[in-house]
Image: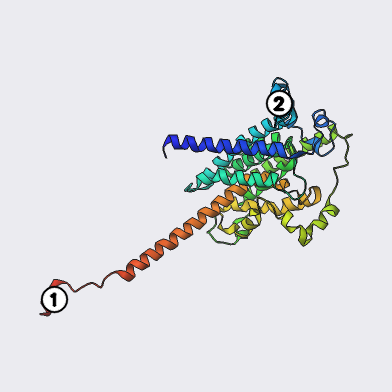
Amino acid sequence: MPASTKLALRTLCAFAALAFLRYYTSVTHMWLNLPAYLTGHERLPFQLRVLPIPFLLGFNKIAEHLPFLSHGKAVLTPDKFSFFCLSSIAFAITTVYLVRLYRAVSPTRLFEGLIFPVFLILCLWTYTVHVGDVLSYPYDLPAVAFFTAGIFYIYQRRFWPLLAVVTIGTFNRETTLFLIGIYLIDSASIPAALGSNLRTRLRFGKLSKVSWARAALLTAIWLTIQLTLQHRFAHNDRSEDFLRVRENLPKLMPRQWPAILNIGAYTVPAILLLRRRIHPIRLSNYLLIFPVWVAVMFCKGVLSETRIYGELTAYIAISVVLLIEDHARVAARRLATQAVETALCTQPTLLPSSASTAEAA
């Protein structure tokens, strides 16, 4: 592809990303009391997610020197401007790791041009298409960036960058705990023949001492950060920090299914059904963390608020494209077989050689 065409397509993708970010930061409702959050007095568990605070304060300082933000017709208020800037940086970082992860897992990279559009659509759906209030938090898109980077380093089996991601990302949102589970799943994954039973691909009993020690280190860091934050904000309002099992039970009724199945634009249920067609197998094994995620969110989240699965958006996008690649390979193989069969059926019958004809005469 010519360089000019690549530049034009990348520019188009950048415009699409900016349109999504402007729409997302403008139409969603910030559930936090932002002044209280920035001063450390917001309700728990929201206040525990402290990483965005210095960035938001910094962008607020910049907004003070941008008078057009105070204009009555401005789409972005100063607070929304800070949210937009932080979300834009996080989205850009996610995109970098999204492409790197796709290139690492796809040997052919046949549909690399699809990966960003699919990711963008999933983000738009995950964070703006909800039944009920469309809420947003400043740590949502940064959480996607940390989780995508974490999955990339897990797949590459680069522990020390993963350690950095878990350490920093835990200050943003506690869902980095699931990266430790994915790390153990990846460490237990072994090569297996395509189509073999899922359970034959995992060997937790054969994990090395190094893997267990590293998982313990990641867990210790996560616990230390969480306990420190809990101690620091022990006197904050806990009215939102409670088990939500009783609240979520009515959401299991059939009339709520369209809302709670809206995970990744309804692609996650399909991915779970087609997981055996996702290759490489190591990557498909990461789906084993999903039931654990749902169980935790059933206790601590609101099931109909499907942004609680947003960290998985990049992984879901890659899984969708890998399934498209698998379908394309199967279709190409079928067409090739049909072409060979058609050629054999239409090939004319060979005539006897001249020598055989002469001998017969």
On the rendered image, what quadrant is the C terminus found in?
bottom left
Look at the picture and state if 281 lies above or below 55.
below
Residue at (77% x, 57% y) in the render: 256
- 192 and 65: which is toward the camera: 65
* Colour pattern of the rendering: rainbow
Q: Quadrant of residue 354?
A: bottom left
Which secondary structure lies at badge 1? helix
Residue 96 image position (x, y, % from top left): 57, 37
Residue plotted at (78% across, 59% down): 252
Residue at x 62% of width, y 43% of height = 151
Secondary structure of the residue carrying numbered label 2: helix
Residue 136 sits in quarter: top right
What amino acid is labelled 1 in the image?
Thr
Pinpoint residue 148: horizontal percent, then vertical percent: 63, 41
Q: Which mark is residue 357?
A: 1
Query: Horizontal placement of 14 versus 343: left or right?
Result: right
Taking the view exactly as shown, the residue that stands out farthest to the front is 73
Residue situated in front as seen by the camera: 133 or 46: 133
Report how many numbered discs are placed on residues in the image: 2
The crowding category of the residue bearing disc 2, from other C-alpha atoms within 10 Å (few below 14, some 14 to 19, many at least 20), is: some
Q: Amino acid at mark 2?
A: Leu
Place of residue 142 in the rendered image (x, y in percent of width and height, measured from the top left):
68, 36
Give the distance between the C-alpha atoms of the residues marked 1 and 2, in whole angstroms: 95 Å
Badge 1: few (under 14), some or many (20 or more) residues near its Cα, within 10 Å?
Answer: few
> Which mark, by number, is residue 69?
2
Q: Nearer the viewer, residue 316 or 285?
A: 316
Q: Earlier in the sequence, mark 1 or mark 2?
A: 2
On screen, residue 13 versus residue 49, left or right, reads: left
